[in-house]
Amino acid sequence: MMRWRQPQARLKALWRALLRLQRPQQSPAVWRGRDTVSVAMVCVLVALLASWPLLVEPSIRAGMPAPFTARAPKAATVVDSTALEERRLQLLPRTTVQIVDQRASLAIQRRLDTSLSQLHDRVDRPAAGLSAMPLTDAEQGWLRSLDAAGWAQWERDLRQAQLRMLSQGLSGGLAESQLLTAATLHLDELPPIARGLGARLLGRSLLGQANLRVDPSLSQRRIEALISQQGIPTIAVRQADLITRQGEPVSPQSLDVLDYFGLVNRRPRPLAWFAVFAQGIAAAAVMVLLLRRARACLEPRQALLALGSLLLVQGACLWLGPLASPLVLLVPPTLLLAQGLGTAAGLSWLAVSCLVLPLPYGGLADLRLFLAAGVAAAGAIAAGRQRSRAELLQLSVLLPTAAVLLQAGLLQGRSQLAQVDLLGESLLLAGLLLVGLLLAPLVEQLFGLLTRSRLLELADLERPLLRRLSREAPGTFEHTLMIAGLAEEGARAIGADVDLVRTGSLYHDVGKLHGPAWFIENQTDGANPHDTLDDPHASAAILQAHVDEGLKLARRYRLPRPLADFIPEHQGTLKMGYFLHQARERDPAVPETAFRYRGPRPRSRETAILMLADGCEAALRSLPPNTSEAEAQAMVRRLIEARLVDGQLALSGLGRAELELVIRAFVRVWRRMRHRRIPYPIAPRRAFSA
């Protein structure tokens, strides 16, 4: 019995250790109810698209591996649908039936009426001229000799001739000489001058015009008639003939035979559909949980971006069918999410998309999906380390090149290689990646994504908000730079996001711009306005206001949410000890909560490191020159221990071991700041006589 309990206890301990490893390092952000419902509804849509083929498509399709071995139960003659369709396509150019379009004919008749009207005006007003169709002297004389009845008769003859020509059908590609010849034949009974002028008018009105249109119903009837005359292609099947062998691709002819014997299920399969639907919901939900684990501050719109990308890819697969390229569909969204939400988020999306995509499996499709997943995974790992848009541009060129070389190498010698346009696929992938790179700033702004390149852009000290801070609150700006150095070293020591900590440190005190003189680092003349105010409650409100005003500035300058979180969380719910002491000297019953920041407390390792750096920076700078490293560590440890006891780090995910590393990192920075300098000798200034 004891022997059994010992392995069982070890398994339980191992399971608890595994759960501790998988637990998020910090508590995920709380979503509102409607946000959770929106994400859940999109998860249902993802599952519906993943299971859609089981509702509307047959159980067997041409090209897929046969699920069973089938033999013909009896002899039969089956229509070969593939050959029949090919014959229809071959007959299509020879069986197009055209009919006269009455609307086009009326428009052409109006052109002749316009020409006759212009000719009549030319005769009545010779100065007007007829530049488009010049008249000879004989034609002008004949026209002037006509009376009203003669004009009307000639016009009727022209219209009748045009109507006969239009009733026979008119093509827009006829040469002018052929139109003149046909018009002359239709006006054969007229005198030579009237016939020649009328033929020219008719040719001018008909040149380049057409009055024929295709009639689909008549064309289809002709195709069916020709197919019936030539015979419908069929497949002769004998009893016990092998139709399909399990695992081998199903040919179009085999599919026709299976369908004839009722072996192709075209009805919805509720049980199979429900299984795939449940799998789709579980996969989408797991993806959201993985995203929240990898990024605790994940916003609902970012989860919707990942699920929406999955929906678009699924829709493209259903629409394109066998033509869908896994490489083109999987790589761009994976890179986008890896840049904006981290490598873990990109790989999570890739794994779930490979599971729920409605792609055909078997043979070449499996190999292409495997290659696409490998290229996308490599791109996600590389994209998570890129620090500039120039590096992303290089990646957008290298990935398609590597993909086409890999596919060409692995598919070499396969008969299906001719079915894949490798060059076109790689060019399309490169185009999509370049378009995504151009649209990346817009997507980052809409969905609050924080890429490495955007972090580095926001850390530029020439940004408008940082320039304003350095100009209007220079003491706060120098304090910010000092804290950024401490926090950056602390983040590097424990493997936190160094770029996020540095950029967040630069913006954490921008709220002091609402009143720089109220903060001691900006008081250059020695006067402290808090002494003049002499109201601890008002002074505490001013300190809280620098957090509130900082959040307003973050919204005004459109700082991403992870950066804006540094503004309130670097103060957490700390006590304003100096003003609390003043208030209790006047009234001992003053509640402590009135002199605490409103928070929230740090909810990430990065904001917690900034809080610790903010608390230790002034203390480290105030140490005397002969302070030892051990004394500095003890002082920093006391400050951090006070934050721990106060509960400020409870939500940050920082452990004791990480805090010890942060302490040592802070002291290393202090040691660099306090290094000794060699005294340089200064030459005495020479005195010059007058």
Image (cartoon, grey):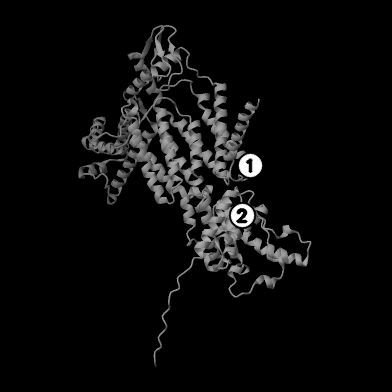
Q: Around disc 2, counting alpha carbons within 10 Å, would you say few (fewer than 14), some (14 to 19), or many (20 or more)?
A: many
The residue at which mark 1 appears reads as 34
Which amino acid is tagged 1?
Answer: Arg
Q: Quadrant of residue 176?
A: top left
The three-letter amino acid code for the residue at tag 2 is Glu
Outermost residue toward the bottom in this view: 690
x and y, in percent, of residue 467 in the image: 50, 64
Q: Is residue 564 above or below residue 258?
A: below
Q: Residue at x 44, y 29 (%)?
A: 321
Residue pictured at 48% horizontal, 68% vertical: 676
Q: Nearer the viewer, mark 1 or mark 2?
A: 2
Q: Secondary structure at mark 1?
A: helix
Q: Are marks 1 and 2 in contact (CB under 8 Å)?
A: no
Relative to 510, 646 lies left or right: right
Q: CA distance from mark 1 to mark 2?
A: 26 Å
Label 1: how many Cα within 10 Å (few below 14, some 14–19, many 20+): few
Pick the quarter of the image with the C terminus.
Answer: bottom left
**499 or 440: nearer the eye?**
499
- Percent across and percent down for residue 485 are 51, 59
Give the number of the disc on residue 569: 2
Q: How many marks?
A: 2
In the figure, residue 298 lies in which quadrant? top right
Depth check, front residue: 96 or 423: 423
Mark earlier in primary sequence (1, 2): 1
